[in-house]
Image: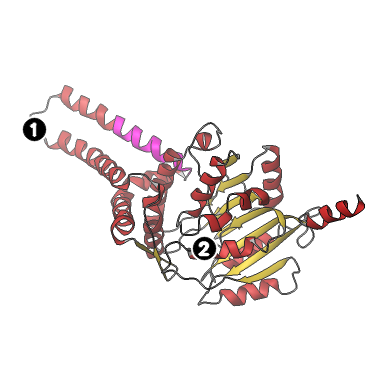
């Protein structure tokens, strides 16, 4: 019996949590992310004793490798992994992020695995609270949608549109309901129980998929395991894009996969613009319109206004950013169409200097 007990103890994961950060050309974002994670070490939850960080350098061509090496120096709880070589010509293989995450997961020693992006900034106590939340709710996967940090006019106008549509397509109440088929997760903060992760194949099982977070959530839910997904500004923030070209490239990669009918959605948003500006133009320019007719047009316009901004408010963005959203519709429509063309026709997207073969996912 003693020998049997010893074997169980040897096989037990030594850490409560393993934090995995895949990083490719993240010299700008990574330092702030690492600083916020290193600050999580607290009494009863010490880095190197209760949890670990696994940094994966995914063939970076900037200073990411230097930053990763510096973070590991003098921090016994921080481990550096080089992502295995990637063959992007193999459509049944890995995308870069999945390749990096899978390499780290196989070396992780935590009971829970947290996959988080290099562009995230974690609030104090975020990790220990997340573990408590997952256990309290008895879930196998906990995912947070971060507070999004945006800069510049186009980010402030377009990002609320994207996230309001995400809130409509993936309502958290339905995602969290075991009786509903819908599943979702956000790869910026995806924490999954280790045994459940490997049972559903982990990132190896969704290797070629560009939208790996949603794919993992679907596998978790279809295996009759539980998900908890919520907006969590109390836990972390994320700066997804720093420039307009980055935002265009990023949403081109994702929009056609996030929304089941991107062209149909684009047409609805075009209708919003036509109604928003067209109704006042008709009311002001039509010379033979009666007061009653103008009053009816005003009611229709107010109804259009209310419907549009009630939808955009689901994005959880500040009121001023939501107000700018109407001006972001042309770019949003362009991104939807561009993403659909790249996925449906070109079968290829660009990200972080890589050309990624893709096929529309359901």
Q: Nearer the viewer, residue 305 or 170?
A: 170
> What SS does tag 2 mark?
helix
**Are the residues at dot 1 and dot 2 in contact (C-beta closer than 8 Å)?**
no
Q: Is residue 211 left or right of residue 237?
A: left
Q: Nearer the viewer, residue 36 or 110?
A: 110
> What SS does tag 1 mark?
loop
Q: Is residue 300 left or right of residue 162?
A: left
Nearest to viewer (mark 1 / mark 2): 2
Residue at image coords 33%, 60%: 347
Residue 64 image point, x, y percent: 56, 73
Res. 97 mark: 2
Whether residue 304 is in magenta: the answer is yes
Magenta stretch bounds: 303-316
Number of residues whose C-alpha sits closer than 10 Å to that of mark 1, classed few (under 14), some (14–19) or many (20 or more): few
Q: Quadrant of residue 226?
A: top right
Number of residues whose C-alpha sits closer than 10 Å to that of mark 2, classed few (under 14), some (14–19) or many (20 or more): many
Res. 287 mark: 1
Residue 358 image point, x, y percent: 38, 59
Whether residue 312 is in magenta: the answer is yes
Residue at image coords 49%, 36%: 181
Predominant SS of the magenta segment: helix
Which callout, 1 or 2, points at the residue further toward the start of the chain? 2
Residue at image coords 46%, 71%: 87
């Amino acid at each position: 019996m003693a020998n049997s007990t010893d074997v169980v103890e040897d096989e037990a994961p030594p850490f409560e949590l393993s934090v995995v950060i895949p990083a490719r050309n993240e010299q700008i974002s990574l330092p702030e992310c690492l600083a916020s994670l290193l600050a999580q070490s607290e009494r009863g939850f010490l880095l190197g004793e209760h949890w670990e960080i696994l940094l994966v350098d995914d063939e970076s061509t900037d200073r990411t490798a230097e930053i990763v090496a510096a973070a590991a120096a003098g921090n016994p709880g921080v481990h550096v992994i080089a992502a295995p070589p990637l063959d992007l010509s193999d459509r049944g293989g890995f995308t870069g992020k999945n390749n990096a995450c899978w390499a780290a997961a196989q070396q992780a020693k935590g009971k829970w695995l947290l996959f988080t992006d290099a562009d995230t900034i974690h609030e104090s106590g975020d990790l220990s609270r997340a573990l408590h939340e997952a256990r309290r709710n008895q879930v196998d996967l906990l995912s947070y949608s971060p507070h999004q940090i945006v800069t510049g006019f186009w980010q402030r106008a377009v990002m609320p549109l994207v996230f309001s549509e995400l809130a409509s397509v993936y309502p958290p109440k339905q995602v969290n309901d075991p009786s509903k088929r819908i599943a979702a997760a956000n790869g910026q903060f995806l924490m999954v129980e280790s045994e459940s992760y490997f049972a559903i194949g982990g990132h190896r099982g969704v290797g070629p998929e560009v939208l790996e977070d949603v794919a993992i959530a679907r596998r978790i839910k279809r295996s009759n395991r539980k998900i908890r997904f919520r907006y969590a500004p109390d836990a972390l923030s994320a700066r997804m894009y720093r420039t307009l070209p980055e935002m265009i490239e990023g949403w081109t990669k994702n929009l056609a996969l996030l929304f089941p009918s991107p062209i149909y959605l684009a047409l609805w948003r075009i209708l919003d613009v036509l109604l928003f500006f067209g109704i006042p133009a008709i009311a002001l320019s039509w010379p033979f319109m009666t007061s009653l007719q103008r009053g009816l047009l005003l009611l229709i316009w107010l109804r259009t206004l209310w419907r549009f901004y009630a939808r955009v408010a689901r994005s959880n963005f500040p009121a001023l950013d939501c107000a700018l959203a109407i001006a972001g519709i042309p770019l949003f429509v362009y991104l939807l169409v561009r993403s659909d063309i790249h996925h449906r026709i070109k079968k290829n997207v660009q990200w972080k200097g890589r050309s990624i073969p893709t096929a529309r996912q359901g």
